[in-house]
Amino acid sequence: MVGNLLFVILLVLGLLSLYAIIQGGKDSGTPPSIFGFSMMSVLTGSMEPDIKPGDLVVVKAADIESIQENEIITYKNGSTFVTHRVIDKVNLNGQTVLQTQGDANNIKDEGLVIDNQIIGSVQFTVPKGGAIAQFLISPLGLLIAFILVLWLIFSHQVKNFIPKRKLDEGEGS
C-alpha cells in the first residue's frame, strides 16, 4: 500500500515537473509555472528578515493593476528575477508603474517596474525550501532521492514476504 501511494505521488510530481520544464522551454523570459504558480529560490538577503537566502517563494501570476502597495512581487530585471516589496504605485504618462525596494535595502530600486516585467505576487515562502530544491536537482540529490525511493518500496515489499507469526502460538505462556 505504501509503495503504491509513493509511486502515485512520484508519478504526479514527475508529470507536473515535466509539464513545467516543457512550458519553461517555450518562453525563456518567464519561469516555469504550474496552474499560474511559479516557485523560485531566493539567492540574496535583500528581503531579510522575512525572506532569507535559500528560501523558496511561491509566486502567483498577477497583472500590474491588481498589485497593491506593500505587496511583495517578483519581476524580471534584465536576465534575473527580483523579489522585492512595492513601495509606490504611480501613473506615469497614462501607464501604471511600480517602485520597489528590498526590505533590507536602504534605497529604493533603480528604475520602475512596468507590466511586462511582472511575474506575479508572492503568495508564501517555504523556509530553506529553495536550498532543499537546489540540492534535490543536483546529481547527488537525485541519486539520494532515487535510492531512498527504492529503499522505501523494497523494504515494504520485503515485509510482505516475511511470514507473520500468529499471536496465539507460543506467546504469552
Image (spheres, rainbow, N blue to C red):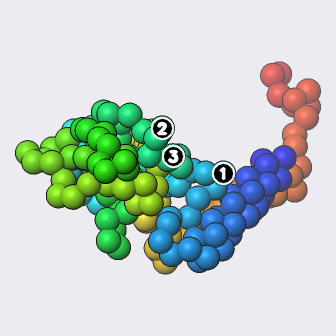
Report the side of 20 relative to 112 (left or right): right
- SS under mark 3: loop
Task: From the top left corner, tell me how far across and down residue 121 is, in percent.
Answer: 44, 44
Which residue does the numbered mark 2 point to in the structure image?
66
Question: What amino acid is found at the position of numbered circle 3 in the picture?
Answer: Ala
Task: From the top left corner, tell me how far across and down residue 4 is, in percent.
Answer: 83, 53
Which circle's residue, 3 or 1, is located before the other in the chain?
1
**Residue 139 in view (yes/no):** yes
Q: Residue furthest left?
A: 106
Identify which residue, 156 or 109, lies in the foreground: 109
For the residue carrying disc 2, how many other residues have a C-alpha within 10 Å: few (<14), some (14-19), or many (20+)? few
- SS under mark 1: loop
Which residue does the numbered mark 3 point to in the structure image?
62
Which quarter of the figure has residue 125?
A: top left
**Residue 162 in view (yes/no):** no
Q: Are marks 3 and 2 in contact (CB under 8 Å)?
A: yes
Report, in whole angstroms, how far the alpha carbon at label 3 lies from the one at label 1. Answer: 12 Å
Question: What amino acid is found at the position of numbered circle 2 in the picture?
Answer: Ser
Q: Are marks 1 and 2 in contact (CB under 8 Å)?
A: no
Which circle's residue, 1 or 2, is located before the other in the chain?
1
Which residue does the numbered mark 1 point to in the structure image?
35
Q: Nearer the viewer, mark 3 or mark 1?
A: 3
Report the side of 144 relative to 171 (left or right): left
Which quarter of the figure has residue 26?
A: bottom right
Q: Is residue 104 above or below residue 153?
A: above
Question: What amino acid is found at the position of numbered circle 1 in the picture?
Answer: Phe
Q: Is residue 165 above or below residue 117?
A: above
Q: Residue furthest top?
A: 173
For the point 10% across and 48% down, the residue is 107
Report, in whole angstroms, how far the alpha carbon at label 3 lies from the one at label 2. Answer: 7 Å
Q: Are marks 3 and 1 in contact (CB under 8 Å)?
A: no
